[in-house]
Amino acid sequence: MKKHFRWMTSLLVITFLVACSRPQAETNAEATNQLTYSNLTDQSSQQEMQERMQAAGIPDATLDNFWKDVQLFNEAIEEKGLTKNGFTRINSLKPNYDFVEMMELWEDNRPDFLGYNCRISSYDLMKDSLTIGKIDTSRSDYLAFDQYAMESSPRELFSEKEYEEFQTLYGYIPTTDTQDINVHLKNIQKDWQEKEIEFLNEEKSSLISVFFHEEDGYLFIGHMGILFPGEADELLFLEKLSFQEPYQAIKFSNRSELNDYLMNKYDLSWDQPTAAPFILENDQLLEGYRQLPKNNQ
């Protein structure tokens, strides 16, 4: 089992590196170059995050499981490279994590569990804040790692109905081979309308999805997090970076800053004729969406 798990995590590293090697399209936009973030290791940042999630109506039982998941991850990697006290401000859009060290610590301390990723964590928190009227699991085969993680989870994550909703929400979406994101946006909206996916409590929380376009003619959610509004227009974005990368809570003043952070991380390619990654807030293009110049990377 452990040998099989190490093989899977090694493959994950390769997949992660390949997925993150797409170049950015050049624009005249000037990107945000600072980040205020926390890995939720201390009482102060946890309390701030808890209050924001409670205000969004996330059930107490769901929140209890979330904090257990955060503790499980942080303890498994021995809090190496994580923030210590509250929120930290850096002059970069990329916290300096040692991914290899985190992976090795995780394998040593949790050898039979792959971990949770962005899709699992986001759906788990938001499953009561959306409805899915029509189940369609026919386009969920790319979620093999997600399924493996859920099967090896130390706690039971989802009911059978919730698992089907998970597959429906994250199923890939057929599209055409064009760089026009407006075409892709319409295909996503049409697909979600047919599945009767509706987002609830939009003023208190929303799902942020980073969509990728593959040359085979389909779209998929490569990354997802949750956006919580606060006082004075402050936004708090919560994400789990990947199976063996940490939880992050990030403060933004507006959605353009959120866009710059996400596009800086995920807008990478090797000049193939596909659309650049694009970002949705629930079922609409993120306000302030833009591509960044290469020199901002």
Image (cartoon, rainbow, N blue to C red):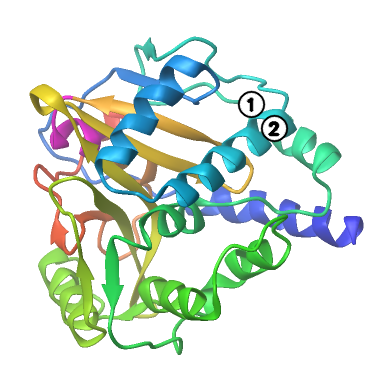
Residue 102: image tag? 2
Q: Is residue 254 magenta?
A: yes
- In front here: 6 or 271? 6
Task: Give the main secondary structure, helix, strand or loop, of the magenta stretch.
Answer: helix
Is residue 112 toward the left or the right of residue 251 in the image? right
For image coordinates 10% across by 67% down, the residue present is 182
Q: CA distance from mark 2 to mark 1?
A: 6 Å
Q: Is residue 183 left or right of residue 38?
A: left
The label nearer to you, 2 versus 1, is 2
Image position of 289 with respect to 77: above or below: below
- The residue located at (39%, 88%) in the rendering is 136
The segment highlighted magenta reads 253-261
Q: Which residue is mark 1?
A: 98
Q: Is residue 70 magenta?
A: no
Relative image position of residue 186 (x, y in whole percent): 13, 75
Residue in the picture at 55% in, 22% down: 41
Residue 236 visible here? yes
